[in-house]
Image (cartoon, coloured by chain):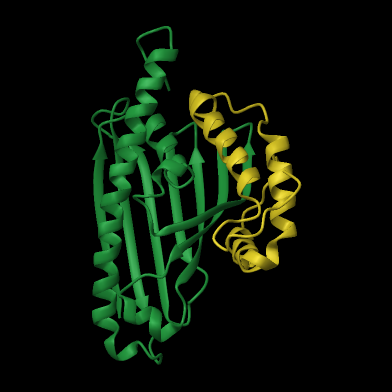
Amino acid sequence: MGVLKKKDPKTSPCAVLRAAYHDCFNRWYSEKFVKGKWDKEECVSEWQKYRACLSEHLEDKHLSRFLEAEAAINSSDKKDSTVFN
Amino acid sequence: MVKAYTQEHIYKHPWEIVTSASWRKFTEPENKRILSHILEVDTLNSNLDSETGKLTTTRAITVNAPGPWFIRKIIGQNICHCVESTVVDGQSRSMQLTSRNVSLRKYIEVEEKIRYDPHPENPNEWTVCQQETSIKIKPFTALASMAEKIEQRCAEKFLQNSVKGREVMERICKYLESANSSTSNSTSGISA
């Protein structure tokens, strides 16, 4: 981590952090969530690192457009207990 | 000019396993070869209501632009960005995914809704997947005159991809089940 290799245009600069988060999430979902253990927050540090990287590379990935669309989709949804944020 | 179709598939695996597989389908590197139309998946947001067991997630999915090659020529784009929002209700055991494209919308609008529910006749062992897809080519574009043909070709492509998707789902379900039975010290497997 830290040093980014010369870019393969197909590889996201956040690929490593993304994989770490998704692995953690997938494990949490199948081992905890579906068994009713949804009271505790998990994968927080993985999420924070990944999310920080994503925001940094918004421009590269045209993700700003996603975020706008997402805001539109979720605007009616009020979320209070944000575990992964 | 809208092409819409629905599909239903019964997985002979419990809801817990099938929905786990749904999360893993696009994020596990070993599925990339089969699901080659999926280029990148990023999670934008994930919220858990720890009181009610409701999980809401938004992901950005980059795919190869749908439809036949000449469309990509006309629109000058090889890729298409989509947003997928998922709501899982852990208490009532339901999962709903809605995906739509956010780029290329002046040419095409695709919306896909998928639901995973326990099978009513065998709720602890089987899962019903219902999928609704609608494809709309926008009028007044370079594509409009061939809209119907393109919608048809897109639909065929989506159907092919959903067959591949189910193959991957089945494979993940199987290994999750085997991992599950080897780690759990009872024979009950996943209990809801």
Name the residue located 35 percent from the left edge and 39 percent from the top edge: B117
Outermost front residue: A6
Residue A19 % position (x, y) = 58, 42
Name the residue located 49 percent from the left edge and 23 percent from the top edge: A35
For the C terminus of chain A, the image quarter is top right
Q: Is residue A9 above or below residue B27?
A: below
Q: Can residue A80 be seen in this view?
A: no
Q: Can residue B21 be seen in this view?
A: yes
Which quadrant of the view contains residue B17? top left
Name the residue located 51 percent from the left edge and 56 percent from the top edge: B40
Residue A32 % position (x, y) = 54, 25
Which quadrant of the view contains residue B123? top left
Q: From the viewer's perspective, tell me whether residue B97 is left or right of residue B168.
A: right
Q: Is residue B130 above or below residue B70?
A: above
Q: From the viewer's perspective, tell me whether residue B1 is left or right of residue B190.
A: left
Q: Which of B97 and A31 is in front in this view?
A: A31
Chain ID for green: B
Which quadrant of the view contains residue A17? top right
- The tint chain A carries is yellow
Q: From the viewer's perspective, tell me whether residue B141 is left or right of residue B50.
A: left
For the N terminus of chain A, the image quarter is top right
